[in-house]
Image (spheres, rainbow, N blue to C red):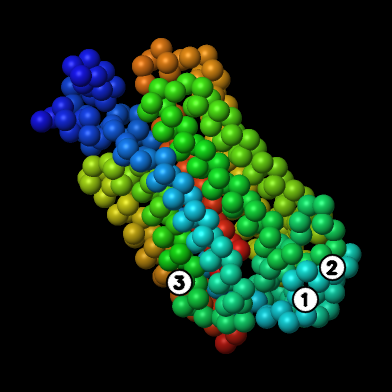
Amino acid sequence: MATNTLSTENKFTWGGGKSPFSVSYGKLMMWIFLLSDAFTFSSLLIAYGFIRYSFQSPIHNEIVKPLAHLSDNFVEQMQQAGLFVQDHWPSPELVFNHFPFVHGMHLPLFFVSLMTFILIFSSVTMVLAVEAGHRMAKDEVAKYMLLTIIGGAAFLGCQAWEWSTFIGEGARLYENPFGPKSFAALFFIVTGFHGFHVFSGVMLNVIIYLNVLNGTYEKRGHYEMIEKVGLYWHFVDLVWVFVFTFYYLI
Amino acid sequence: MEHTEHLEHTETPKDMKSQIWKTFWILFAFTIVDIVLYFILLPYQNMMKNWVFIILGIVKAYYIVGIFMHMKFERKSLMYMIVLPMAFVVFLVALMLNEGDFTNLLRWIK
């Protein structure tokens, strides 16, 4: 028990011999970084909300029903039907309605829901890795870290597919066949910024995973680094919850 | 006393694993609710509808930050340091959604 207390002390005390907030220095700084990053994403999403409401709301779609057949010139059809016009925000269900390997079927928001589940799931494997780290179970930490990396990579792959489909339909930073130009511009900026965070997270996870395999944390006596990177990874998931809410639902 | 406090914070609840999975299913369910509500509310356009989705988002955030990011088990002072500033952000969201609506109105007056 005495040694246990000692190692905990070493792990959490700061240079001054105390640990403010009862957390290690690195963990507190990660929280402060995440708060600042939350402000960055908030500003992007608030800008989205503002621009979204400075346009007319989407025209209600009564033409295309879920699972209906999608023709190759779907965007032009919708333009002619008056659903994609310049002064109305496009309805996300009509824009994000594709799914990989399913060609020509109207599947509104199916793919983006799948992306959400992938990210939530990789968040779960991350927190399981943290939990295994508390028990010093090296093999379990490694297993869950690998699953987290796979989840993150899968999400990035999905996003790449989503972007290429959107670009393939004619959306650019400066051009948007679905309606107001700022719709496409905001899409690329907001999801791009989030995707960059996911990419950084996957890179951090890979470094941590290699360290786990090398036994770095085993030698250090604790797996706190997993917790710190875990905080970042959960934050990325948290941001996606709000990107999903603002971009696809509002 | 100091020592026990230190240890208390490093120790995770005994049933952490089951709590993690419970949280996962809660998040999963809320996401499904989100999507179903989106399609139910699709014909209606008003601010109330947006707040339904924003509040659902905040509920999901509570579970992610509280359980996954371990915030529920940290010191209260740390929690307030991180959570309170975000409350003002929610206020800014409310302001800017309304402000956007007014901008839209001005476009039509012109």
Q: Count residues near mark 2 (Cα–Cα under 10 Å), then give few for <14, some for 14-19, many for 20+.
A: some
- The residue shown at (31%, 47%) is B72
Q: Quadrant of the N terminus of chain B?
A: top left
The mark nearer the N terminus, 1 or 2, is: 1
Rendered location of residue A15, percent (x, y)? 23, 21
Q: CA distance from mark 3 to mark 1?
A: 27 Å
Q: Quadrant of the C terminus of chain B?
A: bottom right
Left or right, B107 with reference to B93: right
Please tell me whether residue A51 is drawn above or below residue A165 in the rendered image: below
Q: Count residues near mark 1 (Cα–Cα under 10 Å), then give few for <14, some for 14-19, many for 20+.
A: few
**Amino acid residing under circle 1:** Val
Q: CA distance from mark 1 to mark 2?
A: 9 Å
- The residue shown at (59%, 77%) is B40
Left or right, A10 with reference to A186: left
Please tell me whether residue B23 is drawn above or below residue B101 in the rendered image: above
Q: CA distance from mark 3 to mark 2?
A: 32 Å
Q: Which of pointers 3 and 1 indicates the residue nearer the eye?
A: 1
- The residue shown at (65%, 53%) is A114
Q: Nearer the viewer, residue A228 or A218?
A: A218
Residue A103 in view in this figure? yes
Q: Which residue is mark 1?
A: A64
Is disc 3 in the same subunit as disc 1? no
Marks 1 and 2 close (CB-CB < 8 Å): yes
Q: Which of pointers 3 and 2 indicates the residue nearer the eye?
A: 2
Q: Which residue is mark 3?
A: B51
- The residue shown at (67%, 62%) is A109
Q: Which residue is mark 2?
A: A70
Which residue appears farthest toward the right when viewing the image? A72
Chain bearing tag 1 is A
Residue A4: quarter of image: top left
